[in-house]
Structure formats: structure tokens, C-alpha cells
Amino acid sequence: MHDRSGLRREQLGFVGGQIDRADHIRTRPELVAQAFASPEARLVVLDGLDPVTADGHLVMTAPEPGAQAQDHVLLGLDESQRPVFVRLSAGVEGGFFPTERSRAVANELPAHEVALYGTARSLVHWHARHRFCAVCGSPTHPEKAGWARRCSACNAEHFPRVDPVAIMLAEHDGRVLVGRQHGWPERFYSALAGFIEPGETIEEAVAREIKEEAGVTVHSVRYVMSQPWPFPSSLMIACIGQAQDDALTLDETEIEHAFWCDAAGVRAALSNDPAAPFIAPPPMAVAHHLLKHWLDGQLVPPGPSA
């Protein structure tokens, strides 16, 4: 299937979850224990933080004999009302960037299983990094079926965090601004992005980040879409803003290079044309779909279908 820009529709990663997160069970330890002991219970299998797959699906097993519910996170109930868990692991290292294996799942698995993996990965990583209280430094332990941790000394409660990130295109005179960071693969460009800071709206963060990184003033910021990004636990909030002019003043500590690209160039990049002016982000990333969304709005006549 193709969209109006003539490009194939491809799967955005980590969206489309179908699991019932079962909040009514999380807060009742006896129901969590009952769900874990159920013969229907399933465990998402991870290799560290990477997914384990077979035959185009996540590998899921029954909990090991003797395993305890408190050492697991209840991810929720699947479409058959089976409880789905993932085992916690304190030995997780790194995890702040996607591996080749975790990138591949968007092309291998159904969308709802990719979303389930993303949820499991974020939570396992969060628990591994929050074994001690941020208030007093004492050990913490899981609570609420793995959706919280409580300090063993000061009783402070801690919850998994989600870091909001604005990812955005500045638009000017039928072109969009794409940039690249230091160390990225040769010719790889993407939308600009940055964390939303305390006290900011999404729109304010978009305007600030584009101004800081590229020296461009934008207005009329509009929201397009969002994507959970479990590396380790961000929410990518994709937007487009209108630039007042096209003069660039780059913050070279953040951006190695940036340029304004027209619709023909964006289409070529999204089509993996070797002659394209840049290499685009992969379909699993929201930046790819943000570029597609912008291109579709330009109403450029598509080329022949593949």
C-alpha cells in the first residue's frame, strides 16, 4: 500500500500496543500472585535487553518453577486475557541506545508485539537503574506488580519515568530543515530533536530547540504524531513549525551540518535513491514518518509505484 506521496507505508516501531495494562490487578498483591501462578501466565523472554524471537513472534514461555511474582513485572493481559510478565534483571548494562537486534524487530514482528517488547525493555531497564532511593540512597524494592519501587528506609515511592522529547521539522518556502549530529553515519540526516525542559510546553520546546541548534525562529508549531522510544524510555513528540527565514546559525557542538531540503530530495531519501541528497532515518523511527507526513502535504506528483 502507498500513501499520497507514492511511498510505501511502513511500520512505525513500538506503537500499536493491544495489551490491557490491568491497573485493577497491579495494586492488589493477591491478584498479582494469582495471575503469576496461573497456568495461562506467559513470560516475555529477553536476552539482556534484546528481544528473543522465533518464527516472526516474540518468544514467550511459562514462568520458571519456583519463580516469584515480585521478581517480575506484570505487563498486562493479552487479547486472550492471559497475564503477561517479564522478569527483572539487575545485571543489565548500557541500554541507552538501540542494538542491531532491537532495531530489527520492527520489520520482523507484528506491531503489537513490537510495542509489547518496547514496554518490557523500558521497565526492565528502569528497575535495573533504580535499585537505590533517589531521596536517601537506601535499597528499593518493586511494588505494584513492578510499576513502582519503594524505599526500604524512608518509604519514598518511585515510578517509571517517561522523558518527553520534541522532534521537529522547520519548514520554509517548500523545504524542510534536516541536520546531522557528530558521529552519525556518512550522509545520514534526520529531524532536529531535544528534550522538553521543565516549565515548557511542547510548542515552546520545539521553538527553543530549533533556535538553539540551528538559529532559526519558528512559529505556528503543529503536532503531528508521537512514538514511545524505549532507549531507555522516551516519548518522541513529532511536530512541524514554520520558519521566519532560512538563515542558519548552527550550534556546532550539537549539529555537525544542516541544510534545507526540497520535496524531491525528501522523496528520493525516503525511497532509498542512491542519488538522494541524504540518507533518511529508517521506517521504525518517527523521524521517517514525520518526513513522510510533510512530503504528503506537499502534494508532489508521485513517481511510478514499485
Image (cartoon, helix red, strand yellow):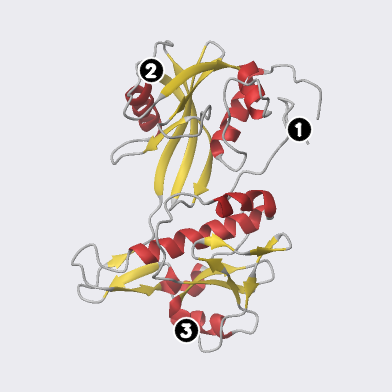
Per the model, the C-alpha gap separating discs 3 and 2 is 54 Å
Q: Which residue is mark 1?
A: 2
Per the model, the C-alpha gap separating discs 3 and 1 is 48 Å
Earlier in the chain: of badge 2 and badge 1, it is: 1
28 is higher (above) or lower (below) than 104: below
The residue shown at (61%, 78%) is 41
Label 2 is placed on what type of residue?
Val
Residue 228 visible? The answer is: yes
Name the mark on residue 216. Answer: 2
- Proximity of marks 3 and 1: CB atoms separated by less than 8 Å: no
- Proximity of marks 3 and 2: CB atoms separated by less than 8 Å: no
The residue shown at (25%, 68%) is 156
The quarter of the image holding the C terminus is top right
Percent position of residue 9, x then y: 71, 37
283 is higher (above) or lower (below) than 6: below
Label 3 is placed on what type of residue?
Gln
Earlier in the chain: of badge 3 and badge 1, it is: 1
